[in-house]
Amino acid sequence: MSKGIAIKVIRCEGNERTDRAFVCGRQGFKKMPDVSQKEVGRRMYHVHREKRVEEAIKKIKHGVGTEWISFTRDNIDLLGHLLQCTWNVIDQKTWENLPFSSMTKNDVMKILSFGEGVGPKMNPDQTAVAEIKKILLSLK
């Protein structure tokens, strides 16, 4: 039998800013759901991946310069999604050493061309990911 953490939220003078949660083992307290180590690991992996891709996009933006404004929010979101899928198949040390700031608008457009039909919960196929990886590894 797994043990969860019990919390009770106390509201001070009705002000939500002063809410406090207290951990306690007494009856009458709500039990927080258990989260497996596997789920914690999965969430940490996703957070790490998102952070690395956000950093890459900042470098790409810097490299593309004033032409960056030609990309819509949807283009940038799609680029992030495609890069996250590609991050999964590139060694971390290799990823960290990729010269994202040397990317051109043309490089970004090539990557975005693999985004047809891609969106939340709809990843690119492995062929597209392999092609994006080739583009990234060819950067100088």
Image (spheres, rainbow, N blue to C red):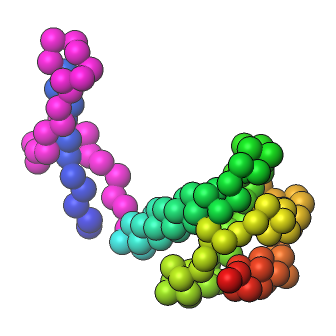
For this rendering, which residue is in front, 122 or 131?
Answer: 131
- Answer with the quarter of the image where residue 60 lies: bottom right
Across and down, in percent, residue 106 comes to 84, 65
Question: Would you say 32 lies left or right of 18 here?
Answer: right
Across and down, in percent, residue 124 comes to 80, 69
The magenta segment? 12-36
At horizontal 74% and vertical 44% (from top left) the residue drawn is: 69
Across and down, in percent, residue 68 comes to 72, 50
114 over 24 or under it: above or below: below
At horizontal 22% and vertical 61% (from top left) the residue drawn is: 3
Q: If the image is split into quadrants, where does the C terminus sit?
A: bottom right
Task: Please say whether residue 41 is visible from this viewpoint.
Answer: yes
Q: Is residue 8 magenta?
A: no
Across and down, in percent, residue 109 comes to 84, 62
Q: Is residue 26 magenta?
A: yes
For this rendering, which residue is in front, 109 or 82?
Answer: 109
140 over 111 or under it: above or below: below
At horizontal 37% and vertical 61% (from top left) the residue drawn is: 35
At horizontal 18% and vertical 36% (from top left) the residue drawn is: 21
